[in-house]
Image (cartoon, rainbow, N blue to C red):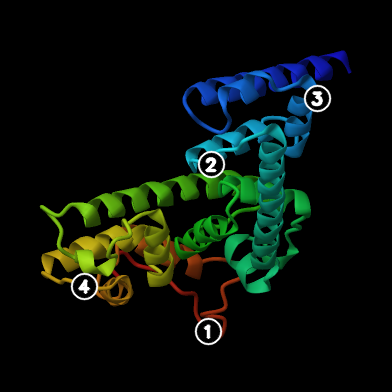
């Protein structure tokens, strides 16, 4: 108990110090308010953010938004609202991933033993964590693993794979963003496509998800660039990527995954075959 109290006091002290430092940078609060905050007010702020590092993170988010508050009660209310929104968003993400995982078709695609693999709320929480608290990002990673015919025995084994795939997809989106914004090298997406709004990761999420390209999206973009295509809307580019994906050559890795899928014990593609099916190199 004493250790918990010391840890919480250290977190409160760090929170108060942040407010002081931020105020001296002209952020969040006037200097006198930040330096004059009472222990009771700091505790209220700490609890409004869900304890731990929550209040500090929310204060940092408010500072990044350029928000200013005239007094501590106003800041405390804003942090409480952010915390409530974060809790609601996390519940929605958990529910979204739970729906995906409880779909028999999806379970059959991601687990060797299909629907017989148990998945509980604890597993769902870890999966959402692996997607950086984003349900849609977790599902993007799961769908890419399915596309690559990756299968797992249990949820605890699946979680690190989702984390790795999420990180790979985010890196690929960063590469795509850099490629599309390089005016000297790429004219695929004309400036009129995004107008005064800067092209960012939200648009890359749409491009990767709606085209269905996943990790092959960048291959399709570069193929379209070589063809000299130009698009005035993001929707047009997404449609072009989707079409180009059907024209890209199948990689040796994809071929190996396809053969592995056909050889799965639960595969029914050749269930009516009268002779054993052999897969020869080059077929």
Between residue 249 and residue 200, name the one nearer to us: 200
Pointer 2 residue: 67
Closer to the chain start, of discs 3 and 2, is 3
Helix, strand or loop for disc 4: loop
Give the label, 4 or 2, closer to the camera.
Answer: 2
Query: Is residue 39 positioned above or below 209 on the image?
Result: above
On the image, the x and y values in percent for residue 85 come to 67, 52
Closer to the chain start, of discs 2 and 1, is 2
Helix, strand or loop for disc 1: loop
- Residue 167 lies left or right of residue 102; in this view the side is left
Q: Quick one: label 4, few (<14), some, or many (20+) residues within 10 Å? A: some
Pointer 4 residue: 231
Q: Quick one: label 2, few (<14), some, or many (20+) residues within 10 Å? A: some
For the question of whether residue 249 can be seen, the reply is no
Instruction: State the quadrant of the C terminus.
Output: bottom left
Between residue 140 and residue 50, name the one nearer to us: 50
User: What is the distance, in whole Å, between disc 3 and disc 2 at their CAs?
Assistant: 23 Å
For the question of whether residue 10 can be seen, the reply is yes
- Residue 114 lies left or right of residue 141; in this view the side is right
Q: Quick one: label 3, few (<14), some, or many (20+) residues within 10 Å? A: few
Image quarter of residue 59: top right
User: What is the distance, in whole Å, between disc 1 and disc 3 at their CAs?
Assistant: 79 Å
Pointer 3 residue: 40
User: What is the distance, in whole Å, between disc 4 and disc 3 at their CAs?
Assistant: 57 Å
């Amino acid at each position: 108990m004493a250790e918990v109290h010391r840890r919480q006091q250290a977190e409160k002290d760090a929170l108060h110090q942040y407010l002081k430092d931020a105020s001296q940078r002209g952020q969040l609060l006037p200097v006198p308010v930040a330096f004059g905050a009472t222990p009771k007010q700091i505790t209220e702020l700490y609890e409004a953010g869900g304890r731990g590092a929550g209040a500090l993170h929310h204060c940092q988010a408010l500072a990044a938004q350029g928000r200013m508050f005239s007094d501590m009660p106003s800041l405390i209310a804003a942090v409480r609202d952010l915390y409530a929104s974060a809790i609601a968003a996390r519940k929605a993400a958990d529910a979204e991933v739970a729906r995906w995982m409880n779909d028999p078709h999806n379970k059959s695609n991601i687990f060797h033993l299909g629907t017989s693999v148990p998945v509980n709320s604890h597993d769902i929480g870890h999966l959402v964590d692996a997607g950086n608290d984003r349900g849609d990002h977790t599902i993007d990673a799961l769908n890419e693993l399915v596309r690559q015919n990756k299968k797992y025995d249990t949820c605890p084994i699946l979680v690190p794979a989702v984390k790795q795939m999420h990180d790979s997809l985010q890196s690929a989106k960063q590469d795509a963003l850099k490629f599309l914004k390089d005016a000297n090298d790429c004219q695929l997406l004309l400036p009129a496509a995004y107008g005064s709004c800067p092209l960012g990761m939200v648009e890359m999420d749409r491009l990767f998800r709606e085209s269905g390209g996943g990790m092959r999206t960048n291959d399709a973009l570069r193929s379209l660039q070589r063809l000299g295509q130009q698009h005035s809307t993001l929707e047009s580019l997404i449609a072009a990527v989707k079409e180009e994906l059907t024209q890209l050559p199948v990689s040796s890795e994809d071929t190996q995954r396809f053969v592995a899928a056909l050889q799965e014990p639960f595969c029914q593609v050749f269930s009516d075959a009268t002779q054993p099916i052999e897969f020869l190199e080059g077929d």
